[in-house]
Image (cartoon, grey):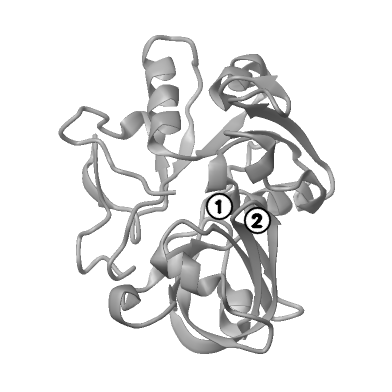
Amino acid sequence: MVYKSEALIIEQNEIARDVFQLRIEAADVASNGKPGQFVMLAVGDGDTFLRRPFALSSINAESNQVVLVYSKAGIGTGELAKRTPGDYVDVLGPLGSPIEIPESAKNVVLVAGGIGIASLTALAEETVNLGCTVTLLYGAQSNYVMYPGSLLPNGVRELTATEDGSAGHRGFVTHLLLHEEETADWIVACGPTPMLESLARMQKDGSLRKPITALMELRMGCGFGFCYGCTVMTDDGLKLVCKDGPAMQLETIDWSEESAPRIHL
């Protein structure tokens, strides 16, 4: 069920350069939301009249609170970044289908690129609580824009990569998966288009042999599947990220130039 409410802002902090962590009190979302789902926020008027999608980064039903992590990258998120504790924000959710955690998942590897980390932290917390061994492979352009490791759920093993070498491995996070794939029995990835395309190519050329679940993030007009603004072509036909996803099998997505999804993170 989807709920619409005015959620109280409890806390908002800039946790890295232009990366914000927003904690809101939204009882219906906190009670019903699951990892892999998202909410749509109304962030202003005029140029920002369309709602923006935000992944559920942490869900706490006991406190009636959820956490959203986002990058200030445009007018809408710029307006949201100005909000302060005590303000209210119009929330619609939870939306999308929860990600299904396989019963066989014991050694989980999460691959995050940039602000794609926002879609994976709730899943990391859930799988740790289920007793899984969880490894997070996290890549960004530099350490200045990285989600702080101190905010990760307890029990998560983190390996990092930066393009400028300022933290962890110098290079792309996809390279780290080559060394971690063998012990993984479930791999989940979320990140910008080039990262997901690279993983798909590595599957195709045999560098990676195991299936990968991708949490897709596209621009959305409605969040319900009415506008068809978040379509992805797959082996099973056209799919909607907001309704059929966000979780989809990476190897089933059509990455040809004319069909490739344009992901905005």
Location of residue 163 in the rendering, given as x and y in whole percent from the top left corner: 58, 25
Residue type at tag 2: Ala
Using the image, determine if residue 207 lies above or below residue 251.
above
Give the numbered dot on residue 122. Answer: 2
The three-letter amino acid code for the residue at tag 1 is: Ser
Q: Position of residue 31 (x, y in %)?
A: 63, 77
Residue at disc 2, secondary structure: helix
Q: Which residue is mark 1?
A: 119
Q: Residues within 10 Å of mark 1 (few under 14, many from 20)?
A: many
- In this view, the residue in front, 149 or 238, is 149
The quarter holding residue 42 reads bottom left
Q: What x and y, as percent, mark residue 169?
A: 69, 20
Q: Are marks 2 and 1 in contact (CB under 8 Å)?
A: yes
Q: Residue furthest left?
A: 258
Residue 21 in the image: above or below residue 18? below
Whole-number angstrom distance, CA of label 2 to CA of label 1: 7 Å
Looking at the image, residue 65 lies above or below residue 248: below
**Quadrant of the image for the N terminus?**
bottom left
